[in-house]
Amino acid sequence: MIKRDYQLKYMSWPQIKNKIDSGCDTVIIVLASTEQHGLHLAECTDEIIGLGFACGLAERLKNALVAPPIIPGLSEHHLALPGSLSLKKDVFRGIARDYVDCYIRHGFKKFIFISSHGGNMQETKTIVEELQAAHPDKLLRNTLSLEFLMKLFSSFEKQYNMPVGSCGGHACAFETSVMLYLEPELVNMEEAKAGFVGTPDKEFLDNMFKYGIVGVSEIGVIGDPTVANAELGEKFFNAVLDEMEKCLI
Ligand SMILES: [Zn+2]
């Protein structure tokens, strides 16, 4: 269960003002998504995972609060399956920019971005670079990259004897494990089914580009969620927090 303690949306303005006055100068902003996550996970999966990481990081940092997550994200490649939403890039970018402008007016000085959805990651990098250039007196950081996650997935697959590609990145052993750790009631393991499992090759990328996720998996899964468990989720969770802390040094 994700704690409410660090989330701005659960606080009153005097509580927020007191926090700022006592040295809390950092806001963590999650860029999530509302999109299909296979047969067994809810559409809010990236929101829950991102919030979980953000609140975990806030707990470690002591001087940070967590913004209401930005949802939906950039999910064009999931639109073939019902429920998924996708923003235009300039709208997505504009919302992130407005978040930072507002929080600067309240006195916050540092902004940590977490993208909990692969499709947002390239854009998040650009948004953070642009915002840093626009606000040279403030500190902006992007904490999660696709490269880091890919390395983490393959090292966990080896270490915990999971088939190669089971942490494929979407509704996979990684996301399902983290959800089992954070919000198990939103996971229906009885429905969990493997989607594309393997190493993405040129054909995979071509099909993904041409047809979106249904071009590579008709159930909308990249990876194998059936090998997921909460214990693994906690390990993943802590490894991601360690990486995010490193990005802030
Ligand atoms: Zn996801």
Image (cartoon, rainbow, N blue to C red):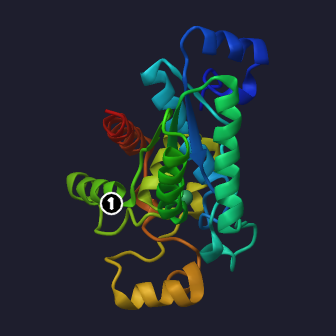
Kindly identify the amino acid type of the residue bearing the numbered disc 1: Glu
Residue 233 found in image quarter: top left
- The residue carrying mark 1 has its beta carbon less than 8 Å from ligand 1: no
Q: Relative to residue 104, is residue 227 depicted above or below? A: below
Q: Secondary structure at mark 1?
A: helix
Residue 204 found in image quarter: bottom left
Task: Identify the residue at image location x=47%, y=63%.
Answer: 122
The quarter of the picture where the C terminus appears is top left
For the residue pair 122 and 205, the one nearer the viewer reads as 122
Task: Identify the residue at image location x=52%, y=80%.
Answer: 217
The quarter of the picture where the N terminus appears is top right
Query: Is residue 111 found left or right of 229 in the rendered image?
Result: right
For the residue pair 169 and 61, the one nearer the viewer reads as 61
Residue 146 x, y percent position in the rendering? 39, 60
Query: Is residue 179 found left or right of 36 in the rendered image?
Result: left
Task: Identify the residue at image location x=28%, y=68%.
Answer: 164
Residue 229 x, y percent position in the rendering? 43, 47
Does the rendering let one see residue 114?
A: no
Residue 247 found in image quarter: top left
Q: Relative to residue 88, is residue 148 depicted above or below? A: above
Identify the residue position indicated by label 1 in the image: 147
Does the rendering let one see residue 15?
A: yes
Residue 14 x, y percent position in the rendering? 76, 12
Q: Quarter containing ligand 1? A: bottom right
Query: Is residue 59 found left or right of 93 in the rendered image?
Result: left
Residue 91 x, y percent position in the rendering? 72, 61
Query: Is residue 145 found left or right of 124 in the rendered image?
Result: left
Q: Residues within 10 Å of mark 1 (few under 14, many from 20)?
A: few
